[in-house]
Amino acid sequence: MAEKLLSRYEELKAQVNFHNYRYHVLDAPVISDVEYDRLLNELKQIEADHPDWIQADSPTQRAGAKPSEKFEKVRHPAPILSLANAFGADDARAWLERVKKIDDRVEKAKFVVEPKIDGLSVVLHYRDGMFVQGATRGDGEVGEDITSNLRTVRAIPLRIPVNSEKLSVKAPSYLVVRGEAFIPIKEFEELNKKLEEAGEKTYLNPRNTAAGSLRQLDPVLTASRPITLLVYQIVHAEGGNVPTSQWEILQYLKSLGFPVSDIPKRFNALDEAITYTETFQTGRNALPYEADGMVIKIDDLTLAADLGFVGKDPRGAVAFKFPAREVTTTLLGIDVEVGRTGVLTPRAQLEAVEIGGVVVRNATLHNFDYIEEKDIRIGDRVLVKRAGEVIPYVIGPVVDARSGKEKTYKPPAKCPACGQAVEHFEGEVAWYCVNAACPAQLVRNVEHFVSRGAMDIAGLGIKIVIQLIEAGMVKDVADLFTLKKEQLLELEGFAEKKAENLLGSIEQAKGQSLKRLLAALGIHGVGEVMAGDLSQTFGNLSALSKVSADELQQIDGVGPNIAASIVDWFAQPANQKLLKKLKAAGLDPQVQKAESKTQSGAFSGMTFVVTGTLPTLSRDGAKEFIESHGGKVIDSVSKKTSYLVLGENPGSKFEKAKSLGVKIIDEAELRKLAG
Ligand code: IVH
């Protein structure tokens, strides 16, 4: 009975391990999750009844005991070597020329091209087919024993075939292999998304995450990270034979059940190998994991070994590096740019560094919240990324590299260009400089001011705008209206005719409507439509400049944020000065007929609020009546309301009008007033 159960147990172990392999190594499961769970549960039940049967190769034993406070040291059975780099095809050819001189067998060499995965190099030991130890590379001689963590990596076989007569493939009794542990890009992005949703700190990049997860002391945490592995080398073998060419090693490792990349190819000539390598550089063959290059290896491992090393780099292989897209450098400082809309953008000043063949000295930091969230400090080593044509950006600090001298950054309280206090709008991340005369914004302000949807000044393109500003002739938009012909003639490219034409169109613009002028001023949240509504409701700039946020919110589409932004704009001394200058230059538009009916008539300049049911006029009828006599109808009562028109069953507006002392009339009186 017990014998039968024991063989069932062995069978279950083998099955669960097999399905793990199908799922985590081949990425091709043959049973559903439910079926898998059923097998695993049966296995767990047997182990619960017979704990003495449990061995290290049981799939239930992946996350086992924690190591004590620190990792033990492991001496590698052979040096864990590094690779020399080649930057480009010429470099790779030069490598081959060098090694040809050392050994003429190289003339006939074949080459294997493999991806160079950017992960953590690990060394796995198998004794009699059992995974007994896993270590980091360390200094190449001695690494750290991270067995407990590596056991949680499902792609690592806990057992490999060995010593059985029946097996067509079997491993030596002691086999040590090397591979690269990593997190695939997609899994990394999903992990970060999950962390973000849970309000937790996100990780910088797959490499650091994989390395960090494997080099901390809690295997349960390692198990929760989507770490996988690809194996590419036999470091040591005893008690059995292994192939002697790299190509055969890869096939052999695969047949033992190790995860092996399917990208490697073998070539008869270096140039073919280089061509294959380069296809991965262009993004045509996007790899699902981060790779910093491809490795070109001499296939004949005996020859490769005979070539010897230079330091820790074997002569028999070379890393063909891709241009890096992510590098670390020092954050020297942060300066602030005032953008086109007055938005302040922090920009990193970096110690010059090459990324993907371009020297980078600046990178964006997105916004001030980003700096705080990522805890980026001046003096930090920072990770900078440049992907495709995109502007480089700072991913975050390398916290481990801190010396303690780094300084936290405080966003500026004042605009670096004009010195005016910066503003923040509720619900937005950005900080703004709202000074319309801020020199940093002047070009874009003037450009916007003269544009078609705004003051529509023909003949005033961006080039001339810049000329005028650089010559000091235009310091704010009001200066446009006092330009003299003699001044224009001083500018390059201006002759009589051109100057006259421009002055003509500027003169014409003085007659533009309030709506256009409002839209032209570039007040945050005030586009063409809003400008139209404001001009209809308030009639002129001086009225608008005195309006309260509450009153503004009576207008359709004006919420507290836009209301605050408008009030704030008019409150700025610099903007008040600008309005005065515009007025002095002849720009003080009152609402024009085409835009509103409020211009002429008995009610011109008056505002009305209607409440309750009027005897004859409907709500719309009353509005039409008032507007046809030049008045305006607004929704809520303020001190500035001229009249409250009272009907039956009035609402709260009646009380408010009374308390504010607003004149109250009925429909008959309204008709009388209209004459
Ligand atoms: S071969 C003699 N092959 O790259 C063997 N290394 O910059 C020398 N790496 O430390 C290494 N993928 O961690 C080799 N297919 C691959 C690799 C690879 C990634 C890493 C490895 C090594 C580093 C050298």
Image: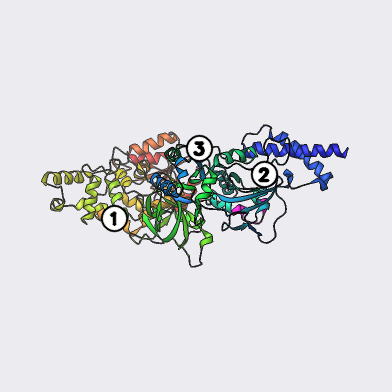
Q: Where residue 492 appears, x then y in whole percent?
A: 16, 50
Q: SS class of the residue under badge 1? A: helix
Count of numbered badges drawn on the protein: 3
Q: What's the distance in space between the residues labelled 2 and 3, CA to CA?
A: 25 Å
Q: Looking at the image, which residue is at 73% across and 39% down?
A: 164
Which quarter of the rendering shows the C terminus?
top left
Quadrant housing residue 30:
top right
Q: Residue furthest front?
A: 104
Residue 266 numbered mark, or none: 3
Q: Earlier in the sequence, mark 1 or mark 3?
A: 3
Residue 150 colored magenta? no
Q: Residues within 10 Å of mark 3 (few under 14, many from 20)?
A: some
Is mark 1 in CB contact (under 8 Å) with mark 3? Answer: no
- Of residues 42 and 544, the one nearer the viewer is 42
Residue 219 colored magenta? yes
Q: Residue furthest bottom?
A: 405
Q: Which residues are magenta?
A: 212-220
Query: Residue under circle 2?
Result: 240
Disc 2 residue type (three-letter): Gly
- Of residues 648 and 305, the one nearer the viewer is 305
